[in-house]
Image: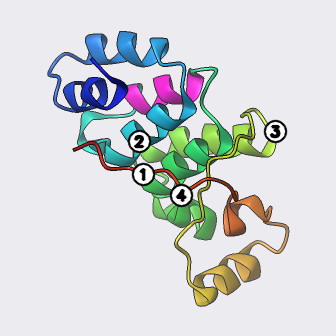
Amino acid sequence: MNGMELLSDLLYAENNNDVINSIRKISKAELLYVFSFHYNWGNGFEIPQTILDNENCDLGNALLLFYDASGFNFLQDQRLIYNTGNFEFLKKLYNRILERDFNYSDIEYIPSLTNVQKYKLKRVNPEIHSIFLDGTIGKKINVSII
């Protein structure tokens, strides 16, 4: 089974423990990124946390997960998500990104923020780190698993 077939199977698996055990074994940042791109957030935060804890998870993937979990709202006004399950996940991930807890690889992730959104974020938080506005440059990953 190649990596993309494995990801396809994992995305539709019903047993989270099997998915978690498989994600822990993934050794390619690109596969983690593709899985993250397709992840169904209705399945909770345990699987994304496992991805983030994988030593092969890079900064681009961490940013992808951050923004997919309502990171823009977190950066704009934490009160928007304070009473949601996203808040603790995002707070911890935000700090890990600032502490440079993720490898910088050649995977590109550019947040899809408009200039107006960037301006608003800078206005609310003048000290916002540029990584949250500009992302990472590098190789664009084909996220198709078909």
Compute the Cα span from label 2 to label 4: 19 Å
Q: In what element is the residue under mark 3? A: loop
Instruction: Please state which of residues 68 and 55 is positioned toward the viewer in this rendering.
Output: 55
Which label was assigned to residue 34? 2
The quarter holding residue 14 reads top left
Residue, disc 1? 142
Residue, disc 3? 99
Q: Which of the two discs, 3 and 2, labels the residue nearer the N terminus?
A: 2
Query: Dot 4, how many residues are within 10 Å of its Cα: few (below 14), some (14-19), or many (20+)?
Result: many
Residue at the far bottom in the pictured view: 116
Tell whether 118 sits left or right of 4.
Answer: right
Which label was assigned to residue 103? none
Q: Which of the two discs, 1 and 3, labels the residue nearer the N terminus?
A: 3
Task: Kindly check if marks 4 and 3 are in contact, taking CB atoms under 8 A apart as contact.
Answer: no
Identity of the amino acid at label 1? Asn
Task: Kindly check if marks 4 and 1 are in contact, taking CB atoms under 8 A apart as contact.
Answer: no
Task: Kindly check if marks 2 and 4 are in contact, taking CB atoms under 8 A apart as contact.
Answer: no
Front label number (1 vs 3): 1
Compute the Cα span from label 3 to label 2: 24 Å
**Taking 103 as reference, is 69 above or below it?**
below
Q: Which of the two discs, 4 and 1, labels the residue nearer the N terminus?
A: 4
Tell whether 104 sits left or right of 61.
Answer: right
Q: Is residue 49 magenta?
A: yes
Task: Kindly check if marks 1 and 2 are in contact, taking CB atoms under 8 A apart as contact.
Answer: yes
In the image, the segment drawn in magenta is: 47-53
The quarter holding residue 72 reads bottom right
Front label number (3 vs 2): 2
